[in-house]
């Protein structure tokens, strides 16, 4: 397989601007959602945008709340459809991490565009044509790895579905079929690795060499990807992220671990301050905003994803300055998950990184509650069965949290097997 071609920044910008103008020309005549949205906002769309700054200045953001409200007004699929309903061949819906699920339809052309993006992700993870890829995924209406599965078949890979099976059955399929690539969430990669230990299955005897993870922060966090790689000897973890609404968005930089790159030939990304909506400086945490350049059947223009990211500062002498936008630490968390505890802003990825440095924690849960009008948090941890001293583990985690966050966070012990396990997105943060 040929390595991905590196594009100069000027070429990326040229393609993005051409993609935006092409998209606007397709959707404005017939897409009722955006036509009415811009009319209500008093926005006059020029025939052609001359540069990206003009585009960002002229058009308002699109929000998930708008999309949900539109589907309530125009059930079942809303009005963000550029073509006649008969053109659409794919149905998916969001995982409803927060709020009601949003239904999403795709034409065959938009679907093919998403498969193109997944081929980029596979190539950058070193996946060879003909590789055996296992998808430890439920294959429900959530977009998840559906596009990855079909992109794999289009590349000539052997795509093996793992829906509807127990974790032990999946492990045995992975070993029996000499799988080279595993696709799942970071949490589930850990769960499978720990189960293999419990069942005395030797993963070092298997053929898995790449584990592509998505669905939650973790794949770009050193403590987590190193933990996964210890459980899966010989395998390397590759992070990726995407959303049902926008499709597969990023891939892990093959040369710089813990860094995601936006596929900028497919998206126009912006990073803004979640409060003001203004662009943030590189190196500052902000919210990722995306415009889908090739999903014209159900497009999103300046969509506020809710994902917290930080643009990586790159030395101008580095050739990577000509590549796509780099996100340091991957997806750090979500704007609706971030909390402030005694003046310290916290999000799930920060806690996950600290907890996963302690390998004797099998699973954990974060409880958020109010005390005297202020938000507080505590952790419940479940030690692995072989943990020699759970009390020492508890005290060690309290000390690690205090050292990293400058906060005293209580840690409680949970009985073995009492905390939930997750196949898809982990829901560890509980608000009381």
Image (spheres, helix red, strand yellow):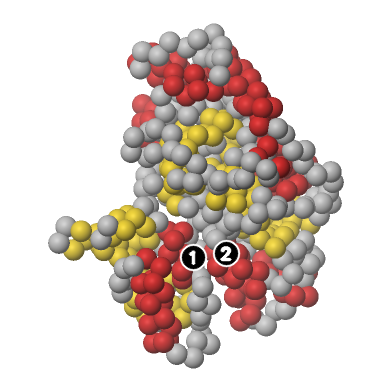
- Vertically, is 27 above or below 102? above
Bin the neighbour count of mark 1 within 10 Å (Cα to Cα): few under 14, some 14-19, many 20 and up. some
Between the C-alphas of marks 2 and 1, the distance is 7 Å
Is residue 252 toward the left or the right of residue 365 in the image? right
On the rendered structure, is 292 left or right of 173? left
The residue nearer to you, when weighing 120 against 86, is 120
Q: Are marks 2 and 1 in contact (CB under 8 Å)?
A: yes
Expressed as whole percent of the image width and height from the top left, the position of residue 11 reads: 69, 27
In this rendering, is residue 16 above or below 289?
Answer: above
Above or below for 21 versus 175: above
- Disc 2, SS: helix
257 up-or-down from 115: above or below? below
Closer to the camera, 252 or 136?
A: 252
Q: Is residue 55 visible?
A: yes
Which residue is depicted at the point 46% across and 69% down?
354
User: Helix, strand or loop at disc 1?
Assistant: helix
Question: In the image, residue 398 lies at what x, y percent?
Answer: 37, 76
Residue at 60% from the left image edge and 51% from the top image edge: 259
* Count of numbered circles in the view: 2
For this orientation, the residue located farthest to the bottom is 388
Residue 76 locus on image (x, y percent): 44, 31
**How many other residues sit within 10 Å of disc 2, few (<14), some (14-19) or many (≥20)?**
some
Which residue is disc 1 drawn over? Answer: 353
The residue that appears at 51% across and 14% down in the rendered structure is 28
Report whether 74 appears left or right of 260: left
Numbered badge on residue 222: 2
Q: Which mark is residue 176?
A: none
Q: Is residue 112 left or right of residue 377?
A: right
One can see residue 160 in this view: no
Name the residue at 49% across, 65% down: 353
């Amino acid at each position: 397989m040929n390595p991905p071609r590196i594009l100069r920044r000027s070429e990326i910008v040229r393609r993005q601007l051409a993609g935006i103008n092409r998209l606007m020309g397709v959707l404005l005549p017939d897409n009722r959602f955006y036509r009415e949205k811009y009319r209500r906002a008093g926005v006059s769309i020029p025939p052609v945008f001359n540069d990206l700054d003009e585009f960002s200045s002229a058009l308002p953001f699109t929000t998930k709340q708008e999309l949900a409200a539109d589907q309530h007004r125009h059930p079942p699929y809303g009005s963000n459809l550029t073509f006649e309903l008969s053109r659409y061949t794919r149905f998916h819906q969001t995982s409803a991490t927060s709020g009601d699920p949003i239904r999403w339809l795709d034409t065959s052309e938009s679907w093919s565009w998403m498969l193109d993006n997944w081929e980029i992700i596979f190539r950058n993870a070193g996946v060879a044509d003909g590789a055996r890829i296992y998808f430890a995924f439920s294959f429900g209406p959530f977009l998840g790895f559906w596009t990855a599965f079909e992109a794999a078949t289009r590349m000539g890979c052997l795509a093996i579905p793992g829906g509807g099976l127990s974790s032990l059955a999946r492990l045995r399929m992975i070993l029996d079929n000499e799988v080279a690539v595993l696709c799942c969430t970071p949490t589930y990669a850990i769960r499978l690795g720990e189960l293999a230990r419990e069942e005395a299955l030797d993963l070092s005897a298997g053929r898995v060499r790449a584990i592509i993870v998505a669905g939650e922060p973790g794949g770009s966090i050193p403590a987590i990807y190193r933990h996964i790689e210890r459980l899966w000897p010989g395998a390397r973890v590759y992070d990726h992220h995407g959303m049902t609404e926008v499709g597969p968005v990023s891939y892990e930089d093959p040369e710089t671990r813990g860094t995601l790159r936006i596929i900028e030939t497919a998206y126009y990304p912006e990073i803004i301050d979640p409060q003001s909506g203004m662009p943030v400086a590189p190196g500052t945490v902000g919210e990722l905003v995306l415009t889908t350049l090739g999903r014209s059947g159900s497009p999103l223009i300046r969509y506020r994803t809710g994902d917290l990211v930080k643009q990586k500062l790159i030395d101008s002498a580095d050739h990577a300055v000509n590549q796509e936008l780099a996100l340091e630490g991957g997806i750090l968390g979500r704007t609706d998950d971030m909390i402030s505890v005694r003046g310290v802003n916290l999000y799930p990825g920060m806690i996950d990184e600290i907890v996963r440095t302690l390998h004797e924690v099998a699973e954990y849960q974060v409880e958020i509650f109010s005390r005297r009008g202020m938000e507080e948090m505590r952790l419940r941890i479940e030690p692995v069965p072989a943990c020699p001293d759970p009390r020492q583990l508890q005290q060690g985690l309290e000390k690690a949290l205090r050292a990293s966050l400058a906060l005293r966070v209580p840690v409680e012990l949970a009985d073995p097997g009492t905390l939930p396990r997750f196949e898809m997105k982990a829901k560890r943060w509980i608000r009381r």
